[in-house]
Image (spheres, helix red, strand yellow):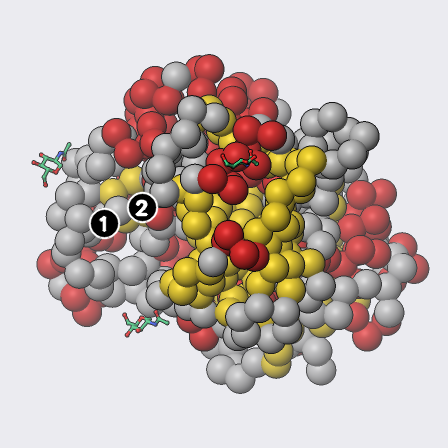
Amino acid sequence: MLLSPLLLLPAVSNALLLSQTPADSSVPGVTAVLLNWARLHNVVHIVRNLCSEEVIRTVVVWNNNPRLHLTRHHFECPERKLHIVNSPSNDYFQARFLACSSAITEFCFIQDDDYLVRTDVIRSLYAYLSSPAHANTSTVHLLPPHEYLSTTLRTTFTSDGTVHTGFAWLGHGALLRRSASTQFLQLLGELGLSDWEMKMADNYYTILGNAFPVVWMDDGIPLDGTGAFTVGDEGDERNWDHITRALRYFERRLHRAEKNTGLDSSYMRTDITRTLPRPPAFDSFTAVCLGGKHGCTITSNINLNALSTFPLNSSATALNMRAHEEARRRILGPERAAWLLQHPLTNAVDLSRASAFRSWQSAAKGDYVLLDLFAPVRTPTMMLFVVDAPTARIIQNASVFALSQDGARWVGLKSDTNLQCLSVQGTGRDWECTLHVQGTDWRFVRVCVVHSVQERWTIFDVRVEGI
Ligand SMILES: *[C@@H]1O[C@H](CO)[C@@H](O)[C@H](O)[C@H]1NC(C)=O
Ligand SMILES: *[C@@H]1O[C@H](CO)[C@@H](O)[C@H](O)[C@H]1NC(C)=O
Ligand SMILES: *[C@@H]1O[C@H](CO)[C@@H](O)[C@H](O)[C@H]1NC(C)=O
């Protein structure tokens, strides 16, 4: 009842699976899909975590290892929630999309077996994608800081607006629409990918979508990493090989779509207005907050001024993501790239005062930090910044605060009466700036620098309390 019978027949050919159209109807919630290969102890741990979360309705363990037969006795999970597929052969990453397309829920959560993704992070993903405002977003990808940076640098687009794509992994945790998974598999079938290419489906997913991937920085909790699939230079080269193949399929398809609009795939977006796109990733970074009850992300443009000098377009043929990434890394420079990874935005929302988000340069007019709480806040509340003394000065003496319901129209807050910055006794380091927020029905809160100061940002922690 919970899953369509397709899932019980992992041996059926791809052709058969692809010919089935899943029911349009879907139930609320999320189907989590986990692949098992060689790290069952990790999978057991992850299943326990996923099964404890309410928005996850079903956990599918797709066992890619035919030498092992998995049963529910391997796992701690309510019986109604767990589905096990013992595949007769290794389906690799394609299995994620086969399982997702057969789910009855509207959304699927995918992750690898060497990270634990916190359940509050999964709730934030769900709150975001299930909101009508994001109905046109197919997927949100979680990425650790180094992958987040790579994804940003690989952004690929052309000046005529036809190409606006990118590359993001799914394995660090991704929430996607079941419909996207189904359409993606259909497209792979139409493009005639080989069996081996199909198995490496992850490498094709974002590129063929022709939409800038929506990515959130998240650290994840590392589990035992031995026996990973992508190891060393050989693994990297295999990934680049498939990324290049994906780009060639993409170009061919785009070319055909241009000549005959009837070939529009529902997965690959070819209907966008022909204007020079500006990738959102070049303007701001977003990280997911830990501990957000209803969901929360932080967004900031701090540290991104180098990205504004990035070449904004490339040729529409022979797209080369690797060359893009290398050229942009040279513009960024190794010191600044290292800085971004050592002091990432996630450090400001990890519930810890030990780590900090730091700026590479001093605070400039227009710098902002914004929290999205995903739901209207209806009660008076308090925004707390834990910072160093220079940052307290930036916040108190060079910035303004504003609230918004939609992230577009902002209402200023009088910070002289509502904001207080005090040094925390005994630490000799920390300052706490508290903003009392009386307004109701707001969802976004933002602090924005109005005149540049010769001080760098250091944010140990930022949060909205009492919601
Ligand atoms: C989604 O895309 C359609 C078609 O381009 C557009 O009409 C609609 O306004 C978009 N919805 C949102 C919420 O952006
Ligand atoms: C980028 O776009 C500009 C203006 O549209 C155009 O003149 C230039 O040739 C493009 N550069 C590349 C590398 O495509
Ligand atoms: C802001 O400026 C005022 C007046 O110059 C000063 O008294 C106050 O200490 C400054 N705030 C911080 C956090 O340094």
Q: Position of residue 220 (x, y in %)?
A: 68, 42
Q: Position of residue 292 (x, y in %)?
A: 67, 58
Quarter placement of the C terminus? bottom right
Between residue 452 and residue 118, name the one nearer to us.
452
What residue sits 29% from the left and 60% below the top? 269
Q: Secondary structure at mark 2?
A: loop
Between residue 93 and residue 331, name the one nearer to us.
331
Q: Is residue 70 left or right of residue 326?
A: right
Q: Is any part of residue 2 visible from this angle?
A: yes
Quarter placement of the N terminus? bottom right
Residue that numbered label 2 is attached to = 279
Q: Secondary structure at mark 1?
A: loop
Q: Is any part of residue 148 visible from this angle?
A: no
* Residue type beneath disc 1: Pro
Between residue 260 and residue 398, name the one nearer to us.
398
Report, in whole angstroms, how far the alpha carbon at label 1 lies from the one at label 2. Answer: 6 Å
What residue sits 51% from the left and 20% below the top? 338
Residue that numbered label 1 is attached to = 277
* Residue type beneath disc 2: Pro
Q: Position of residue 172 (x, y in %)?
A: 61, 44
